[in-house]
Image (cartoon, rainbow, N blue to C red):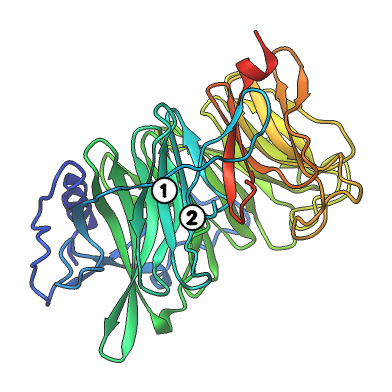
Amino acid sequence: MRRLSALIACLLAGVAGCSCGCDRKASPDAFVLEARVMDAGAPDSGGDLGIGPDLVLDVLKPDLGPLPDSCGGSRTLSPQPVAPYAGKPCGKGCKQVTFGNFVEKEYEVVGDLLVYVGEAPAGFGAGFKVYLVDLKTGNEVMLQDYSKKFSGCSLVSTDGQKLAYTCVRERQLDLWPEWDRSLTVFDPKTSIETDVFCIREKLASNGCDPDYLTLGGTGIVVNGTLGACKHFTALFYRFSDGSFTNIAQKKGGVWHTHMSGTEIVWTQAELAWQASQIVLYNTRTRVKKRLAPNDGADQYLPRTDGTHVVWTDHRNGPGGRSMPGNADIYHHDLLTGKTTQVTTDPGTQEKPDVWGDWVVWQDWRNSPGGWSRGGQAPNCDIYAKNLKTGQEVQLTDYPKHEAYTRVDNDRVFYRMVDGTKWASVFMIDLKTRLGP
């Protein structure tokens, strides 16, 4: 079996240009390479499944033949400008910053880059588009749009310099379709897109889509399922050596991966009926540990800026991952090792983010019926708290739904309907809103 490291090194070379024979006129008999996902080391106690033959992936050669939608190699994209419109007023220090098609939930903001996946207007099965906003200039472009049905890009992330996303290309071969799923890196400075990892999915394989993806300083982490939707994993792609490592695999589940710098956090449950916990993994030391364990109550949806970790926690009241109830926000300082409670209101506070001294979250305390299944309660607002001063502020008070918060460089981002039929991202400058 050929070595995976040689293949990945060849693919990565294409980030700076087209190399390793990535000419699209490659021979149609390009081979498929088998490669095992490597184990991260000693397994955790509890629900680890281990690495077995059923977790073998089909890793594809950089050149996969003449089909234009095949996975592998590099290509130069032609970003398509997105025209802004009037937008929706949102108060002092606030403005609408995205104008593409419907913003999906897991957008990302780091530095001057905001990235998101937008749903194609044709609806279900029509695929998804990748968008990039330069917050310094305000320019927005659509980067990738696969036009075939059941093709499209489902997840996107940024580290403030480059983008990472995963896409599916449908390939019609004889009477049966196949899908090439890529893990792709895009450099805005050169407009070069490179597939750093490819998996071939056939109709009979019953593969499952990844759930979360994030790009950090040392690599890319993606979580989802392998092997007929039954192996819950977090997989780390390391830039330095091209390794693809299984860093978490639990019978109960592994979700909500997020990364900043060398730190990765995620939600995991040892077994399906046990409470979920927050886990931290350092990509340099390869040390993994649970943060602030509380086995009797669910903890989930962690985010980190590399120094702080925040999450949703149910230790103070009823509820859980599927029914938030009295959820609170908790914070862990990686430098001091101290864990503190951020919110105390008996309503539902969830989906936090952190940057420096600021923690932000979506809050249901002003909703008459509280949180409801499916997020249909009439009023969800955005709140923020300064960890240094203890100041808590309500940032939005519209009568409907503002949600999915992000915070970066004293700017708070959230998603809401912009007056059209689309959900867009809005940005609040905290220095302008709150003053010096």
- 125 displayed left or right of 413: left
The residue nearer to you, when weighing 289 against 221, is 221
As drawn, 417 above or below 89: below
Q: Are marks 1 and 2 in contact (CB under 8 Å)?
A: yes
Residue, x 74% and y 33% (percent of image)? 396
Q: Tell me if I can see residue 40 in this picture.
A: no
- 70 displayed left or right of 252: left
The picture places residue 44, in percent across and down from the top left corner, at: 56, 50
- 410 displayed left or right of 287: right
Disc on res. 340 = none
Which residue carries the number 2 mark? 118
The residue nearer to you, when weighing 301 against 417, is 417
Tell which circle, 1 or 2, labels the residue nearer the N-terminal end: 2
Which residue carries the number 1 mark? 131
Q: Given the image, on which type of amino acid does mark 1 rest?
A: Tyr
The picture places residue 310, in percent across and down from the top left corner, at: 65, 34
Residue, x 38% and y 61% (percent of image)? 167
Residue, x 47% and y 63% (percent of image)? 120
The picture places residue 229, in percent across and down from the top left corner, at: 53, 71
- Mark-to-mark CA distance, 1 and 2: 7 Å
The residue nearer to you, when weighing 49 against 105, is 105
